Amino acid sequence: MFSVPVVDKKSVPLMPTSPRRAARWIKTEKATPFWSKGVWCVRLNVEPSARHLNPVVVGIDPGSKREAFTIKSRDKTHLNILAHAVDWVKDAVEARKNMRRARRFRKTPCRQPRFDNRRKSKIPPSTKARWQWKLRIAKWLTKLFPISGFVVEDIKAKTRGQRRWDSSFSPLEVGKSWFYEELGKLAPVKTRQGWETKELRNRLGLKKTHSKLVEKFSVHNVDSWVLAWDIVSGNEKPDNESLLVLVPLRFHRRQLYAFQPSKKGIRRPYGGTRSLGLKRGSLVKHSKHGLCYIGGSSKGMLSLHSLLDGNRICQNAKLKNVSFKGFGSFRFYRKEDAANSSHG
């Protein structure tokens, strides 16, 4: 079971508490509940009885398709996060380049190529987007938990001694260094090699599932858990295997036109991040469909999407029937592990 993050009147994170105690605080009006992107939290209305903080560490296991985060102290595993990686930026940049090139050959107004803006950034857009996603999650967690440190599995690419092959891995090293530097501004950062993570698993008798896309604790979060355990120690078996799954939303912010032209070669405008005054991706509650998030809009009606799978629920929701709950750039849902559910 997840712990409940606690913040004081000034939103300074305190030690998490149990759901039962949090409910008691709310009933006696000592605290006010609120949601933070899928995590139920409480804000104290009174001065806390103590501000003693135990070490709380975030273990991070990066990956190409899925990434794992575990927030753990010595006595409790507070939260396990399984995040889908951002994997569409490379194709989007390529498509943007081709569309710009095609517009220059058409008899339409367009800007001239700007050759002075090439190679200004050392990190390619796709690589930077992946590491920025990890950093966004880390910053969000520091607002909910009193994080004392991060421990990251240090990923490395194998080189072959071939120039064309080896050069493709340099962005990984640059992006990783940038991430460590930015993460260090939040809390101290430690790294572990892959073989060290494996030795920790074997030492604790934990097994890892190799089906990379299965949403189970034993696939990725077992690594993030042992990384955090290596710093704060505690029970040698995971006490919480439930997952909060995060899926980043894709926004078309700067796409000028639809890729496919309609009749007579006319391309309709495409892109933007607002729908009837609401920011796309925002969490709302509909009178009929419940909790969902904002998609597009058409003819004065909103498109609502499911948090579970992202599928569109309806495209004719009225603005007056939705209540705004919070901004969001990712959808989320809970995933209870079978082993964890068996314990009741």
Image: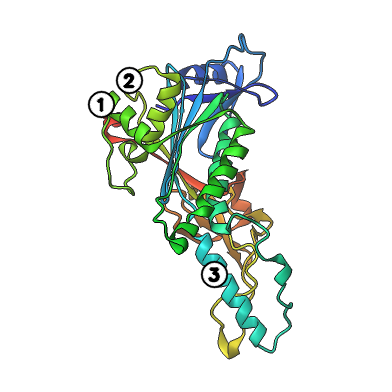
Q: Residues at badges 1 and 2 in contact (C-beta under 8 Å)?
A: yes
Amino acid marked by disc 2: Glu
- Out of 20 and 54, give the one closest to the viewer: 54
- Out of 133 and 22, give the one closest to the viewer: 133
User: Residue 94 bears which disc, if any?
Assistant: 3
The answer to whether residue 284 is seen in the rendering is no
Decide which of tag 3 and tag 2 comes sooner along the chain.
Answer: 3
- Residues under labels 1 and 3: Cα distance? 45 Å
Task: Look at the picture and state if 87 lies above or below 47.
Answer: below
Question: What residue is shown at x 50% (from left), y 26% (from top)?
Answer: 57
**180 sits to left or right of 74:** right
Decide which of tag 1 and tag 2 comes sooner along the chain.
Answer: 1
The secondary element bearing badge 3 is classed as: helix
Q: Which residue is mark 2?
A: 236
Q: Residues at badges 1 and 3 in contact (C-beta under 8 Å)?
A: no
**224 sits to left or right of 35:** left
| Mark 2: few/some/many CA within 10 Å (<14, 14-19, 20+) | few
Task: Look at the picture and state if 177 lies above or below 253.
Answer: above
The secondary element bearing badge 2 is classed as: loop
- Residues under labels 3 and 2: Cα distance? 47 Å
**Name of the residue lying farthest toward the top:** 49
Question: What residue is shown at x 62% (from left), y 75% (from top)?
Answer: 257
Amino acid marked by disc 3: Glu
| Mark 1: few/some/many CA within 10 Å (<14, 14-19, 20+) | few
Q: Which residue is mark 1?
A: 205
The answer to whether residue 328 is seen in the rendering is yes
Task: Give coordinates of residue 240: x percent, y percent.
Answer: 37, 27
**274 sits to left or right of 235:** right
Question: What residue is shown at x 59% (from left), y 71% (from top)?
Answer: 96
The secondary element bearing badge 1 is classed as: loop
